[in-house]
Amino acid sequence: MDRPNGIDWYIKWFASIVLIIGAATTAMDMYPYNMYFQFTGITGWLIVGWIWKDWSLIVVNTVGSLILFAGIIHYHFFTDWMLRIYEYHLEALL
């Protein structure tokens, strides 16, 4: 089977691998890193859907990207994430 030489082939495989990493980080409770990986993977599939003009991919991945983006914004602006990182740093030093 010959590999397509369009950029969409590379984007879809990169996005798929990143989504697998995102699922693994979710299973290992690595919050908020799981949101970063999943946002990157879903946005990659959104770009592929746009290239292919596939409305089902565009709609599903737009909604998913917006939900994850809202979660990332909420984490950084409406939680005490800096204090948590500092607490973990102190625990590691002890």
Image (tube, rainbow, N blue to C red):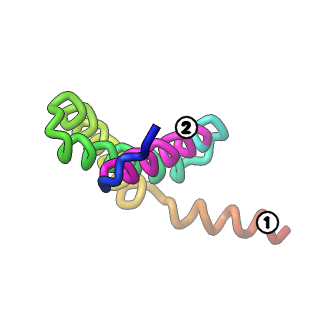
- Look at the picture and state if 72 lies above or below 23: below
Q: Is residue 85 left or right of residue 79?
A: right
Whole-percent x, y for residue 18 in the image: 50, 48
**Where is mark 2, residue-wise?**
23
Whole-percent x, y for residue 24 in the image: 61, 39
* Total marks in image: 2
Whole-percent x, y for residue 29 in the image: 62, 41
Q: Where are the magenta residues, as a range?
A: 8-24
Category of crowding for the residue at label 2, using alpha-carbon neighbours closer than 10 angstroms: few (below 14), some (14–19), many (at least 20): some
Q: Amino acid at mark 2?
A: Ala
Q: Are marks 1 and 2 in contact (CB under 8 Å)?
A: no
Q: Earlier in the sequence, mark 1 or mark 2?
A: 2
The overriding secondary structure of the stretch rendered in magenta is helix
| Quadrant in the rendering for residue 54 | top left
- Look at the picture and state if 85 lies above or below 70: below
Question: Is label 1 in a helix, a strand or a loop?
Answer: helix
Question: Is label 2 in a helix, a strand or a loop?
Answer: helix
Residue that appears at 45% across and 46% down: 13
Category of crowding for the residue at label 1, using alpha-carbon neighbours closer than 10 angstroms: few (below 14), some (14–19), many (at least 20): few
Residue that appears at 55% across and 47% down: 31
Disc 1 to disc 2, C-alpha distance:
26 Å
Q: Nearer the viewer, residue 69 or 1?
A: 1
Whole-percent x, y for residue 53 in the image: 14, 39
